[in-house]
Amino acid sequence: MLKQRTVKQLVKTTGVGLHSGTKVELTLRPAAPDTGIVFRRVDLTPPVDLPASATGVGDTRMASVLDRDGARVSTVEHLMSACAGLGIDNLYVDVTAEEIPIMDGSAASFVFLLQQAGLQEQNVPKKFIRVKKPVEVREGKGAQEKWARLEPYDGFRLKFFIEFNHPAVDVTGQYAEVDFEAESYVKEIARARTFGFMQDVETLRGMGLARGGSLENAIVMDEYRILNADGLRYDNEFVRHKILDAIGDLYLVGHPLLASYTAHKSGHTLNNLLLRELLAHPDAYEIVTFSSADGAPRAYAQQTRQEWAFN
């Protein structure tokens, strides 16, 4: 059968929050089967557990934020994306502040951290959410319209279109499609970094956001060009990062999806609304397991066999 996964041992790192600028220590710990991914604010007395869930998301300005009883854990999407990419079902995530560290702005550091901890299969079936009927959410009209959709698909595929009307973005690919039956999360998505614009920095910091942002953890642009000396990691890194975010946002539903996701200028808010729309229609999905890898979609069957390395 396809089995649930956790990590073999505890592993730690430190960093700063992208929006808060606060130093934070992150500890990843093994969790029992059917625990899910649980964020824990260990700096609070008593500690507060915030399970990863679509309905547990509060604020979605510039990040996905879990909120429970006044306690918050912000910017969970990159770590959630890495967990989805490596097939981690159960994990405790201890943090000493209200935001997950941004690391280098991608999911690569979290992939490396999870690989350091080692992956451990658990002798219980992995649960999937199979989308049975199309579900869609939309916002705005005309040129301002944004939308996101989930459709039935025997695997996991994402298609994303972005539009920023910025010369540095426009010259790169603004559309990307990734099907994990044929492509590797680690090689094709994990290293794509978050990005931002210098002209937005003062506004964002006035809102209490982007206080920890720098050229070390984001692609930064002025009005015309990319300011990072090392350029881009992928030719279409901007849209690949939006796919990375979407994978993390969608994994907040609690289980890996068997679905095709298509998005037009979507973000954290629409991604969360899409999950809530799915959960509001019980006839649109079902929970499934697979007794053997042979009967499972290749996107997930090969996840149990691959060595998830960057080379």
Image (cartoon, rainbow, N blue to C red):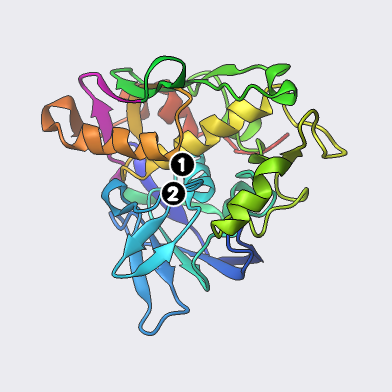
Q: What range is drawn magenta here?
A: 125-139
Question: Judging from the image, what secondary structure is the residue with disc 2 in?
Answer: loop
Coordinates of residue 300 in the picture (x, y in percent): 42, 30
Q: Viewed as shown, does residue 116 lie left or right of 155?
A: right
Coordinates of residue 6 in the picture (x, y in percent): 43, 54
Q: Is residue 16 above or below residue 141?
A: below
Residue 196: give its label.
none
Q: Residue furthest right?
A: 229
Q: Quadrant of the C terminus?
A: top right
Q: Are marks 2 and 1 in contact (CB under 8 Å)?
A: yes
The answer to whether residue 249 shows anywhere in this view is yes
Q: Quadrant of the N terminus?
A: top left
| Quarter holding residue 189 | top right
Mark in front: 2 vs 1: 2
* In the foreground, 123 or 140: 140
Q: Residue furthest left?
A: 283
Q: Amino acid at mark 1?
A: Gly
Residue 64: give its label.
2
Q: Main secondary structure of the magenta part?
A: strand
Q: Amino acid at mark 2?
A: Ser
Label located before the other in sequence (2 or 1) = 2
Q: Neighbour class for label 1 at 10 Å: few (<14), some, many (≥20)?
A: many
Residue 238 part of the magenta segment: no
Q: Viewed as shown, does residue 308 lie left or right of 121?
A: right
Coordinates of residue 209 in the picture (x, y in percent): 57, 56
Q: Is residue 295 above or below residue 20?
A: above
The residue located at (59%, 58%) in the rendering is 206
Marks 2 and 1, how far apart in space?
Answer: 9 Å
Q: Neighbour class for label 2 at 10 Å: few (<14), some, many (≥20)?
A: many
